[in-house]
Image (spheres, rainbow, N blue to C red):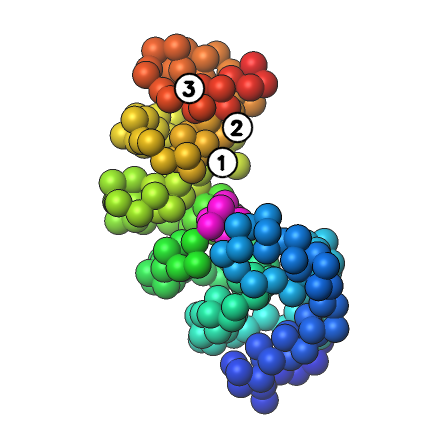
Amino acid sequence: MRNNINLNNQQYVEELKKLYSEHIDPVYASWSENYMRNQFDFLGIRTPIRRKLTKQFLKEFGSPSKENLPDVIFALWELPEREYQKAALDILSQVKKTLIPEDMEWLSSLIENKSWWDTVDELSPQIMGHMFKAYPELLSQYADCWIKDENFWLQRTAILYQLKYKKGTDEDRLFQYILYRADSKEFFIQKAIGWALREYAKTNPLLVKEFVASNDLKPLSKREALKNL
């Protein structure tokens, strides 16, 4: 690994941009932009290739220091091409065990900026799920507030952060959050409710069936929840 002690944050990001620029695919970029409803620009780097490039980059330059991490992540988040937000998430996944409760304020701001399912659905179980498992005292300050927030991406994160918890799932909190937003007309919330229940059904199918049968969920949420049962 190259010693990157002399690289400032801007130089670090520029090195990653340089690497990515060597793999631009205009045709796939156009397809990606259409797929994402033209909300973001794209370089056209397919996900497996991007992850390989980021891994190569981190091997050469190392992860940002704890002190520089927020600035690097925000610098990537502000770039127009969507691959850079995904690169930021790749980096966060690599260093998530170093994150502490004080990081939650800036981490949670990522949910509300350049929000769409592709970033939120990675932040929710991978980063927020990790943080709430490592520091459960954060739940009352963040997740319990997110489910009541007007921002439906925060609501979705609250519903999905336990997606990978399996037997460690806090059923009471999951069901409480779902019922709080069960009448939502927002597609992304109805879908999240169904997804969270479908995933938990792999661990406790009978309880999920009983919950769906006993509560007034939107048709989309029910279909998604029971899809594999």
Quadrant containing the N terminus in the rendered view: bottom right
Work out how far the residue at label 1 is from the one at label 3, CA to CA, in angstroms: 21 Å
Q: Amino acid at mark 1?
A: Leu
Pointer 3 residue? 219
| Residue 170 can be seen in this image | no
Residue 163's disc is 1
Residue 41's disc is none
Residue drawn at x 33%, y 60% as measured from the top left: 105
Work out how far the residue at label 2 is from the one at label 1, CA to CA, in angstroms: 6 Å
- Density class for disc 3 (Cα within 10 Å; few <14, some 14-19, many ≥20) is few
Q: Is residue 126 above or below residue 41?
A: above
Q: Is residue 121 left or right of residue 33?
A: left
How far across and how far down the image is residue 59, in percent? 70, 70
Pointer 2 residue? 199
Q: Is residue 194 left or right of residue 6?
A: left
Q: Amino acid at mark 2?
A: Glu
**Sequence order check, earlier mark of 1 and 3:** 1
Residue drawn at x 44%, y 41% as measured from the top left: 161
Select label 1 or label 3 by which is in front.
Answer: 3
Decide whether the magenta segment is chiefly helix, strand or loop.
Answer: helix
Q: Which residues are magenta?
A: 116-123
Q: Is residue 206 above or below residue 69?
A: above
How far across and how far down the image is residue 144, in percent? 27, 41
- Magenta-colored stretch includes residue 118: yes
Contact? badges 3 and 2 (CB < 8 Å)? no
Quadrant containing the C terminus in the rendered view: top right
> Is 44 or 72 nearer to us in this picture?
44
Contact? badges 2 and 1 (CB < 8 Å)? yes
Q: Is residue 222 above or below residue 139?
A: above
Q: Amino acid at mark 3?
A: Pro
> Is 39 or 4 nearer to us in this picture?
39
Work out how far the residue at label 3 is from the one at label 2, CA to CA, in angstroms: 17 Å
